[in-house]
Image (cartoon, rainbow, N blue to C red):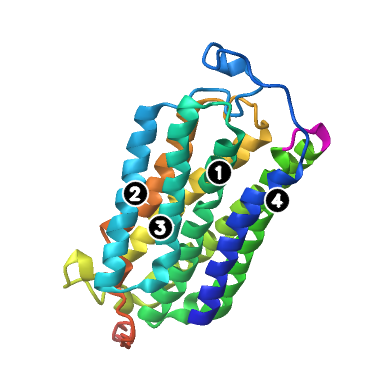
Amino acid sequence: MARRYRFVERIFVFIAILALMTPIVDGQTIIGPPANLFLDPKDDPYNPLRYITSNTLTAIAFALVMLVALVQTFYMFRYGAKWMLAMVIGGYTYSVGFGCRFGLHYHPDSEGLYIVEYMFIVLSPCMFIAADYVLLGRLARHISCPTHVLLPVQKLTFVFMSSDVTTALIQATGGGLSISHNQAPRQWGSHIFLAGLVLQLVSFTLFSGIYVRFLYRVYTLERGVWERDKAEPWYRDWRTLAVTLAISCIGILTRSGYRVAELSQGFQGYLATTEGFFYALDTLPLVIATSVYVFSWPGWFIKDGTKTVHVEPELSNSP
């Protein structure tokens, strides 16, 4: 399983490289931008964002994302759960995207900065999603209830991780084509990118449904397991981790829904060209989806290499 997980991480690195290289194949050049780049960014065809990024909002987002990544790095080495590495790496790559937004504030016409910013901002959440996929299987085994997951946990993790990699590749390809200066590949890129986002949303919605079903079955059929940690402090109660994963799923679903709605309007639509929507419906949900693990790190609950004890459900005595 660990070898398979490392392979998936290498795939994500390949996706990032592919995403950054794809736009380079279009060798067409365009006339330089206007003298004043800040006069009318909304109607400036050389400004891909159609607005001037706010350094204040960028600084806040960068600081929060980087802080979460640093804390999770410390937790991972101090308390274990190295299988959450995808989320940690995603936090750092996500912060790279925000770092590029500082540059875009001063150079809004920089195509290179925009490409790097957009790809890291859009593709990094794939790492957050991958971590949540892995966590469900770990949690099910931790409480010895893998039979209540719709699929065998190893198969479930493999299926959804494969889906995550596939949708990330589709988004990377579409994103690269959409930055082309030619109309035809740009339109194709937009459609491909949207397809990748829709598939990602569908996949994660299915996963969330499977997770809700899992919790419901444990609650109704395994009452002993459900209440086994009720005498423990919250940071040792497995239900705390279960709620944490649920909050993370809600954040990712919110962001995924926003991205689908945004791209359905096109890259120059109202959602895509309004910075407030980006921070309220993309950044904030993802910060919540990742920072929630700062307060309930999986390594506090699931110890690497330890065995779990199954607690039989309580049965009422027959009259």
User: Mark 2 = which residue?
Assistant: 66
Q: Nearer the viewer, mark 3 or mark 1?
A: 1
Q: Residues within 10 Å of mark 4 (few under 14, many from 20)?
A: many
User: Mark 3 = which residue?
Assistant: 246
Q: Residues within 10 Å of mark 2 (few under 14, many from 20)?
A: some
Q: Main secondary structure of the magenta part?
A: loop
Quarter of the image with the C terminus in it: bottom left
Residue 58's place in the image compared with 173, above or below, is above
Using the rendered image of the protein, determine whether residue 198 is visible from the camera's viewpoint: yes
Q: Position of residue 291 (x, y in %)?
A: 33, 52
Q: Quadrant of residue 110?
A: top right
164 to the left or right of 247 = right
Question: Type of residue at label 3?
Answer: Ala
User: Between disc 3 and disc 1, whose residue precedes?
Assistant: 1
User: Mark 1 = which residue?
Assistant: 116
Question: Type of residue at label 4?
Answer: Thr
